[in-house]
Amino acid sequence: MKCSEFLQELTNYLDGAIDDRTKAELEDHLAWCHNCYVVCDTTKKTIEIYRNSQLYELPEDLRTRLRTAIVSKCHAKKKAGPEGV
Amino acid sequence: MSTIQNRVTEPPVSDELKLVQAAKAGDVGAFEELVRRYDRNVFRIAQHITQNREDAEDVVQDAFLKAYGNLNQFQGQSKFYTWLVRIAVNEALMKLRRRRPERVVSLDEDVKTEEDSLPREVADWSPNPEQQYNQAELRDILSRTIQGLPPSFRTVFVLRDVEGLSTEETAEALDLSIPAVKSRLLRARLQLRDRLSRYFQRRESAPGKPRHESGDGNQ
């Protein structure tokens, strides 16, 4: 397996969306190709860092303000009837 | 090497359908419960796409109000959340287009070759790279890094990898084919990895030195 072929399968590998045979071929490649091992490992870390980052969390006060505005507009639409929706 | 686990735990679909049915019948309280369930997700997705806090706030309001106004069009073939995400992504892309009229913003945009995503620099990272920075620094690095991706790539990345939607749900929410989602996801992941390497790579190794020795994982 070439490195380019490994990279093409990287997303499926990390997502566990591959059959056992392909998985074995990819892991065989990983066992001897240090570069692909590093790419695979650091790509996985990239995903985990973003997933755990709490980037763009909605602050509780803003959350309440937005929800209050949404609910109030929903009530207004409801009062206006189907044509107002 | 283990695979990535999804972090999203979703409420039972039947419970959600009941809320949708009640909201359709005019129960605003039921709709409010749906807002509580997904407002954080919609805000995160919107801010990832628009990269602007005020726009993200607008998207949360507009997306939920549009969903409320169009509840009768929700037929229940997909999950409510996937349907809502589709609305939110469209609202966010509209904001982005308004803010950057000089640039065409489309989910169909693609990159000509595979070369852009092929790792240029294969440097290993420190064992706990995120611990080299404090929370504020780390958020700044992550935000600036993802901002550099084309909108179509970061949208797929945030839905699949941050929000934990399946490939099929992402394809449905973005009206893309499954191969298109997979291709964009691969490129997004590789480009982010490549860009983060400059912050997270091991400091003790000589920069730029190629490493071809047989791998022991170096962990």
Image (spheres, coloured by chain):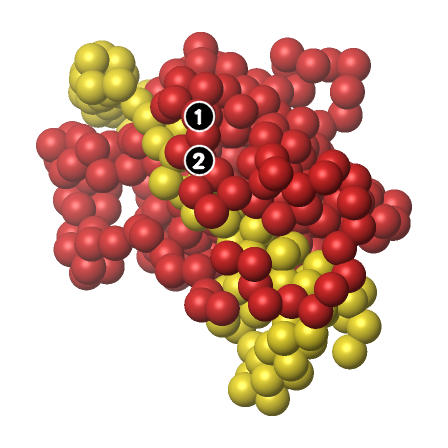
Chain in yellow, by letter, is: A
What residue appears at the point 69 percent right and 14 percent down from the top-left corner? B100
Residue B147: % across, % down? 61, 25
Q: Is residue B128 left or right of residue B8?
A: right
Amino acid carrying mark 2 in the image = Glu
Chain B, hue in figure: red
Residue B133 in picture, x, y percent from top left? 44, 25
**Residue for point 64% across, 12% down:** B99
- Residue at left offset 48%, top offset 38%: B129
Q: In terms of depth relative to the viewer, which is nearer, A60 or B17?
A: A60
Front position in the image: B168 or B17: B168
Label 1 sits on residue: B133
What subunit carries mark 2?
B
Tag 2 residue: B130
Assess whether mark 1 and mark 2 are in contact (beta carbons under 8 angstroms).
yes
Compared to residue A4, the image places residue B46 above or below, namely above
- Secondary structure beneath dot 2 equals helix
